[in-house]
Amino acid sequence: MADKRKIIMDVDTGSDDAIALVMAMLDQRFDLLGICSVNGNVDVNLTTDNSLRVVECCGKQDTVKVYRGADLPIVSTLMPYTPQVRWGVPRREGQRPGGQEVHPEHLPLPAPVTKEQPQSAVAFYLETLLAAEDHSVTLVPVGPLTNVALAIRSDPRIVDKIEEIVIMGGGYAVNNSTPAAEFNIFVDPEALEIVLQAGCKVTLVPLDATHQAYITGEEAKLFRAIGTKPANLVADLIEQRIIGYSRFDADMQTQAPIHDALAVCSILYPEVLKDVEFINVHVDISGGIAYGETILDRRNRTFGDPKNTYFAHGADREMFRDWMLEVLRKDAAKA
Ligand code: RIB
Ligand code: CA
């Protein structure tokens, strides 16, 4: 088998984060070096606990460790006037109809019997990356970018150790937390701007792509038919997400996007992302109505700033679905 792809998952587990973790742990082409939790969908105590639950559901607790990360964004909640404070960041999904179904505080799994590691997420990033070969590790942040930004700021030497940063976040024609911003970036806008200016190869898997790669309730039955604990968890979470989305998204009545898992899929299958453009992206960090917007410079109006991001405007839904089914079926066949 070709060399496994070394990855570090950074998650605000969350239901789609959980599905992304299942795929990252069960697809044998990954070498998952660790999981870093961050404040996001729910607070960091819960994202850490939920990540431990998923690791145990997949039976990987002996080899895959969880490192607790940041409990607050770097800047966005410091001042009382920002939307993040007025609306409460992380603006819990639970504050809107269907939010609790999309991101319950506790995933529908047994409470974990294992604990997170004593090292913080940032300490884990620094130790692991500084010891790694150049350009050898792919970071996969699928929650707010706080941990990754803090690690880069703490020791910029890690930048040369990173092969690519594949981020679920941002939006161009599609946003979900404000008219301009997607949730992961809205929680900590400055964090993404730090990452974008660091000089790594960055791929953004935004809502424009993830909303094309939805999974239907009928397809959830295909996952349940596999019959393993991980497959049943995926089916449960897809069905829960559909219930939640049906309450606040007119376009998602019998289906739901599985945002974070698409980012993981794109590492092995870049062709799953469609209409990808290499472009300069900045984040609005000015604190106004567009705070957290990912701004694409299509006419080189940022005074010649370099192109820094591969931005996907679409996705191949069937390829994404079939990858998840294949990985879970292969896992079942090993049982
Ligand atoms: O906007 C979608 C993103 O916000 C996903 O990563 C979801 O888990 C939430 O974190
Ligand atoms: Ca997430």
Image (tube, helix red, strand yellow):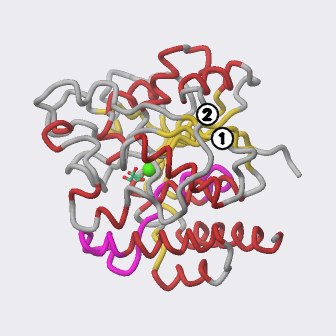
Q: Residue at x 89, y 52 (%)?
A: 1
Circle 1 sits on which residue?
Answer: 65
Along the line of sight, which residue is nearer the eye, 58 or 190?
58
Q: Is residue 232 magenta?
A: no
Along the line of sight, which residue is nearer the eye, 212 or 137?
137
For label 1, the SS is loop
Along the line of sight, which residue is nearer the eye, 291 or 20?
20
Q: Residue at x 70, y 28 (%)?
A: 135
Asked if residue 318 lies left or right of residue 251, the reply is right
Neighbours of disc 2 within 10 Å: few (<14), some (14-19), many (20+): few
Q: Which residues are magenta?
A: 243-271
Residue 254 percent location from the top left of the image:
38, 81
Camera-side mark, 1 or 2: 2
Neighbours of disc 1 within 10 Å: few (<14), some (14-19), many (20+): some
Asked if residue 65 lies left or right of residue 237, the reply is right
Q: Residue at x 25, y 50 (%)?
A: 177
**Of callouts 1 and 2, which one flags the residue occurring earlier in the amino acid sequence?**
1
Asked if residue 239 lies left or right of residue 33, the reply is left
State whether residue 84 is above or below residue 156: below
Circle 2 sits on which residue?
Answer: 117
